Amino acid sequence: MKKNNLATSIILFILAIALLFVAILNNHKDNTANEVTTTTLATIQKQVSPYEAKDVMGKVVIIQNFKNSSVSNKPTNSFEKTLTMTGVVTDGYLYVKADVGGKALTQYDDIYTKLLETSPGSYQEYGGHLIKSQSLDTPTSETQTELLFDLSSIKYKKNFTDSEKEVLSGNWLSVLNDSSSKKVLGFSSTARQGNIQEMAIYYKCLENTNCSITVSP
């Protein structure tokens, strides 16, 4: 009996050690899985940041290297371009890169732009002075300013003197999809020499379809 009891004790001890080993192994696997999941989520979040995501979209340049200043709050020059759309755009961004005298924009400088919609008996304007502080994240630089806005929520104010807390939002995405032809106008709102290095629209088409946005004078 004593030998049987000893054998039983040894078997139970071995079984307990085995169960402990399995538990430790499973815990290690769970921790490893959690680390992989966390790393994967961080990678995905970085990949879909708006500034990076725009580069895999379609792109149409509205204007490049457009220079002007403003005198008595009126621009010395402005641009107006016609946009023609085909298909359906489901997502996108308005992008602006600008400088004033070769430097980044200050609190006294901004970019003014509007999307114009005309139809028989109707005229609508969407936009104004773009609010820099409401831009999506972009790289910072001492020599230029980059702005990025979701097309469905362009942040602006009507007048330069308005507080940046008086935020208005224009849904350019909806307007662009509303009809085939629109106009975009704009200028640098600054008393110094302003330069819109580039203003562009990045866009994504309805899944499994083709779409395009073209610009003409």
Image (tube, helix red, strand yellow):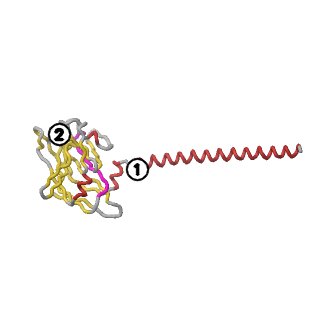
Q: Position of residue 80 (x, y in %)?
A: 15, 52
Local packing at callout 2 (Cα closer than 10 Å; few below 14, some 14-19, many 20+) is: few
Q: Which residue is mark 1?
A: 47
Q: Position of residue 45 (x, y in %)?
A: 42, 47
Amino acid on which the number 2 mark rests in the picture? Asn
Q: Is residue 101 magenta?
A: yes
Residue contact at pointers 2 and 1, CB within 8 angstroms: no
Q: On the image, which quarter does residue 109 sit in?
A: top left
215 vs 140, left or right, is: left
- Name the residue nearer the viewer: 21 or 64: 21
Q: Which residue is mark 2?
A: 159
- Name the residue nearer the viewer: 2 or 199: 2
Task: Specify the segment rendered in magenta.
Answer: 89-104
Indicate the secondary structure of the residue bearing disc 1: helix
Q: On the image, which quarter does residue 183 sit in?
A: bottom left
Q: Quadrant of the C terminus?
A: bottom left
Q: Nearer the viewer, mark 2 or mark 1?
A: 2
Indicate the secondary structure of the residue bearing disc 2: loop
Q: Position of residue 77 (x, y in %)?
A: 12, 46
26 vs 215, left or right, is: right
Residue pushed farthest right? 1
Amino acid on which the number 1 mark rests in the picture? Gln
Q: Is residue 112 above or below residue 165?
A: below
